[in-house]
Amino acid sequence: MPHLPPNQSAQIPAPRSPSAPPPAAPEPVRLDAAVIGAGFGGMYALHRLRDRLGLTAHAFEAGDGVGGTWYWNRYPGARCDAESVFYSYSFDEDLQQEWVWSERYAAQPEILSYAEHVADRLDLRRSITFGTRVSSAHYDEDRCLWLLATDTGRRVEARYLVTALGCLSAAQAPGIDGLDGFLGEVHHTAHWPHEGVDLSGKRVAVIGTGSSGIQAVPEIANLAEHLTVFQRTPHYTVPARNRPLTEEEFDDVRDRYPELREEARDTAVGLLLDPPPGNAADLTETERTAELERRWHRGGLGFISAFGDLLMDETSNTIAADYVRERIRETVRDPRTAELLTPADYPIATKRICLDTGYYEAFNRENVSLVSVRDTPIERITPTGVRVDGTDHEFDVIVFATGFDAMTGAYTRMDLRGRDGRRIDEEWRAGPRAYLGVAVSGFPNLFTVTGPGSPSVLTNMMASIEQHVDWITDYIDHLERSGVAAAEAEEEAQDSWVAHVAEVASHTLYSRAGSWYMGANVEGKPRVFMPYAGGLNLYRQQCDRIASQGYPGFTHTAKRSRGNPSRKHLRPAR
Ligand code: FAD
Ligand code: NA7
């Protein structure tokens, strides 16, 4: 089956034939720091470790190029929904001055070109091994080294392991009976073929209506003879109002880039959005409607900051949700379709808010139909299509827009083991546990870029990536200068951070939706709100405080003078 994400079993290397001699194991390569992933997180980590700290650093990437998300997600309509001028690196003034964004929200090819440009500019490729998946990473406590093995048979030793695996990189397709027997083409939005897919004049199914499905539907509708959208849960989406950026606009941003970035850094989401005029209760009904109206017409993520308490207060949230519901009924001509498309039973923005370009309008087209699979799930894939509630729908192409095992999937799909053989999938069985979302107790010298328990997916990820990588590499620099062989998050510090993450989330409405933030889209995954909802600005302050106090919450093991680590702790880091 082409272009579907690998499932767990597909990642286990095929057994060698018993008669073939085992290949000679190549000598491990010794590094100061190994980075896994060459998306924006891994690229920046590699640059800082190699070029700023002067360490021997190397990255391993499963894909054949840089860009991560933007290398894999090439479906029609894929584009960012944080404004391009902010969805980009800020660490290099020359870089941000020389790159020109063409649209308010850049499309996937432009973002991928940007990633490639950065890789060239920083000469990163010579330190990245592409087409190579790290299949295991085990910590050797005696030598304070991470031992990595790859699916291409490489073995690597590294003192530090920086994982930039991506919060949304472990794509998943539901195990629906009959899929193997489908005679047409099957694709997943997150594994879209690089050569593209010819959808013109075809009968196409899109399964899934999250952000990817919502971006893809209007584009596919333009190409397909007929498009059928299979929807389990209607998502809230607001218009992106994407448009070309004018030269004047862009010049203005460039002139003020340093100051705009500084301002964005000090926000909860790492982006400049219009601040709310107050909580919903502080405004009159007329003011509330005007505020929503203004934001709807401006387009973009700013809609959900219409009221300061939109994510905390049910009444406030309902006012915004009702506004969107009215827009759906107003836009979609067929009342039954409109009703199906209208989210009814969870607060707006508790599943990630989507931005669209003509999503609801697409359902007014003759060649687009909607099938709800909420009460009657897809029964099976037949050789010619999809069976729902006893009805067969025939297709040439099936597109899964069914999302990701978010935030933890890329970790638990890898054989990651810390001290005493502790396995990450066991440690996180009841939900992910990490100190500041950046380090895991029992896994010394492992640093997780935008790991669970950090703000990550609730923010402009570029801002979160930069904050995390800066903090991690400053910490590694500190460890190097202090003669520390191993740094490990203390269990107690981790427990209190995990409790803090849960406590902050409990003041929000997030737990009211079965979202991927909560692990609800993966069968058997614990229902735990995984990102940190306290805001990037407050999070940054907490991380900075910990650094300035000498990294309390971490235990440091000293190097022995001859290179072997001593078991003696350097000092209680507290
Ligand atoms: P990724 O870009 O996911 O890169 C991780 C890389 O690690 C991947 O290339 C993967 O192949 C590699 N990898 C994973 N495991 C292994 C392994 N074991 N061995 C080797 N390689 C491995 N965020 C925003 O802030 N704004 C947006 O508008 C936005 N839009 C998005 C749209 C889509 C369709 C998706 C899927 C995500 C979007 N995101 C957005 C989130 C996006 O993932 C981040 O913005 C950002 O690109 C993440 O960068 P990263 O380097 O952390 O992870
Ligand atoms: P999402 O947001 O997880 O959306 C996946 C969609 O697929 C969602 O509508 C799911 O319904 C649906 N789904 C999953 N399994 C099924 C089955 N078995 N049948 C029908 N429908 C199914 O992933 P996206 O790729 O759209 O977006 C992920 C993030 O990437 C996005 O937020 C951006 O940040 C970029 P459900 O809602 O679970 O009922």
Image (spheres, rainbow, N blue to C red):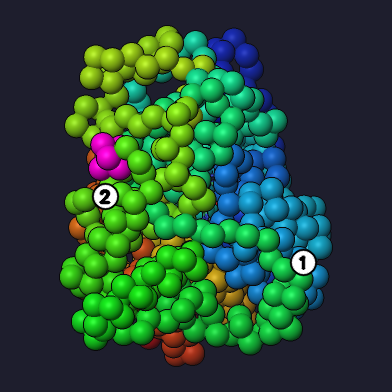
Q: Main secondary structure of the magenta part?
A: helix
Disc 1 versus disc 2: nearer the observer: 2
Q: Residues within 10 Å of mark 1 (few under 14, many from 20)?
A: some
Q: Is residue 354 visible?
A: yes
Amino acid type of disc 1?
Trp
| Element carrying mark 2 | loop
In percent of the image, x 63 and y 60: which residue is there? 243
As drawn, the label of residue 283 is none
State the image coordinates of residue 178 (x, y, percent, origin top left): 37, 14
- Which residue does the numbered mark 1 point to in the structure image? 99
Relative side of 450 to 346, left or right: right
Q: Amino acid at mark 2?
A: Pro
x and y percentages locating residue 574 in the rendered image = 38, 86
| Magenta residues (range) | 335-340
Find disc 2 in the rendering and name its residue.
Answer: 343
| Residue 179 in picture, x, y percent from top left | 41, 18
Residue situated in front as seen by the camera: 406 or 76: 76
Image location (x, y in percent) of residue 247: 76, 71
